[in-house]
Image (cartoon, helix red, strand yellow):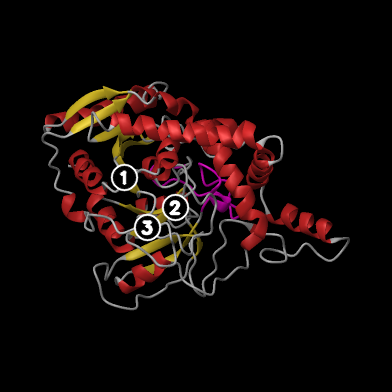
Amino acid sequence: MSSDLNAFITREEIPSTEEGPLSGQTVAIKDNISTEGVATTCGSEMLADYVPPYDATVVERLKTAGATIVGKTNMDEFGMGTTTETSAFGPTDNPAAPDRVPGGSSGGSAAAVAAGEADLALGSDTGGSVRCPAAFCGVVGIKPTYGLVSRYGLVAYANSLEQIGPLAPTVEEAAELLEVIAGPDERDATTRAPDETTYADAADGDVDGLTIGIPSQLVEGADDAVVDQFEAALATLRAQGAETVEVSLPSVETAVQAYYVIAMGEASSNLARFDGVRYGQSGGHEGDWNETFAAARDAGFGEEVKRRILLGTYALSAGYHDKYYEKAQDARAWIRRDFAEAFERADVLASPTMPVTPFRLGESLDDPLKMYLADANTTPVNLANLPALSVPAGDTEEGPVGLQLVGEAFDERTLVRAASAVED
């Protein structure tokens, strides 16, 4: 494929340090994951010149597993977007649907894999940012259970929601990459040792007797072309012995609102460090410190990042914290409860990954609400801290469609098994 997709911000080879299970494999890294001596920009002018002095834990694990890192991939600025168009370094094209967005915010990683510019890739998923581009680019993406993969070295957007996850051409390859990066890390207190430590061997396609729950709330409202491919994928699973049952997740109707209040609140706190003094571009030396601070942030941040910081600061401010942020946390608890009840009837849940096909480049930039609403099927998973996987379900005239499978906490193996049956 052509390299004019703008999938990479920095192309620089980082060699492996040991032989291992990924020897001979190339991996692209999303540009919000720290790489020692190699620029990590987060898709922002604010960090255009930032070179980390250390590797993220996942990068260390890739190098010791034999992987060769081939560069840092384009992304929505600080992970804030669904299209990879808010990047300060320009948009990425979709190799599976030219002139359409690759999804976001890990669009560069998904595009690099889909185009064969890297064998594998890492992205980060705060509200669907691995699964969305996986669906739009026709590749596999896994959002692991919160705590399965270390976030040490990931430039934070919303700490309580985000996880680093793999993107790959096949389910088995994504599972192999997950095996390498998963596991506890003493530098990230949110990590824990999972009961199962292998995932690739679960890609056996054996779904005989598996019960798949279909939440009607995550299917209603999806484009007809998306629903057609979703139903075809379910038929494939039924033909191999799986059973489907309808389940209900009534609280997910508030998920997008709750997600954006929580994510923007955490972002406004996390991005406070980018003031031109501690991190980021200098705001000059005119006026008082507040004017310098404001000048740095005005020059360094793009419009979407500014919008989310302002909204997040407002939601956390005195007089509005209880009205917005506390209610969003209540909604998060209801979503977790609904998922728990659904898993009493089903082993995994299934929905379209995205309710729409890939937008045309430029189509959603003037309507942020349209972009936010496209996250309706992915954000509930992050609020509940559950694992989810997007596997290609089929193609439409507007581009690929993904099937999202959601599992119970730390049950990635069941997701891998079910997804491999769809793939087969």
- The circle on residue 149 is 3
Q: Nearer the viewer, mark 2 or mark 3?
A: 3
Label of residue 390 in the image: none
Indicate the position of residue 309 as horizontal and vertical percent values: 66, 45
Q: Label 1's element?
A: loop
- Earlier residue among tags 1 and 3: 3
Q: Is residue 316 left or right of residue 121?
A: right
Q: Position of residue 168 (x, y in %)?
A: 31, 53
Residue at the spot 32% in from the left edge and 73% down from the top edge? 64
Counting from the top left corner in percent of width and height, residue 245 is at 23, 24
Q: Amino acid at mark 2?
A: Ser
| Amino acid at the residue labelled 3 | Val
Instruction: Return the residue nearer the eye: 405 or 159.
Output: 159
Question: Which structural element holds mark 2?
Answer: strand
Q: Residue furthest bottom?
A: 17
**In this view of the protein, can residue 362 be seen by the observer?**
no
Q: Quadrant of residue 339?
A: top left
C-alpha separation, residue under disc 2 versus residue under disc 3: 11 Å
Crowd tier of the residue under label 3, counting other residues whose Cα lies within 10 Å: few below 14, some 14–19, many 20 or above: many
Q: To which residue does mark 2 refer?
A: 124
Q: Is residue 96 magenta?
A: yes
State the image coordinates of residue 395 (x, y, percent, origin top left).
Answer: 32, 34
Q: Quadrant of residue 3?
A: bottom left
Looking at the image, which residue is at 34% across and 45% down?
387
Contact, mark 2 vs mark 3 (Cβ under 8 Å) = no
Residue range in magenta is 75-98
State the residue position of label 1: 409
Q: Nearer the viewer, residue 87 or 17?
A: 17
Q: Where the C terminus falls, by quadrant?
A: top left
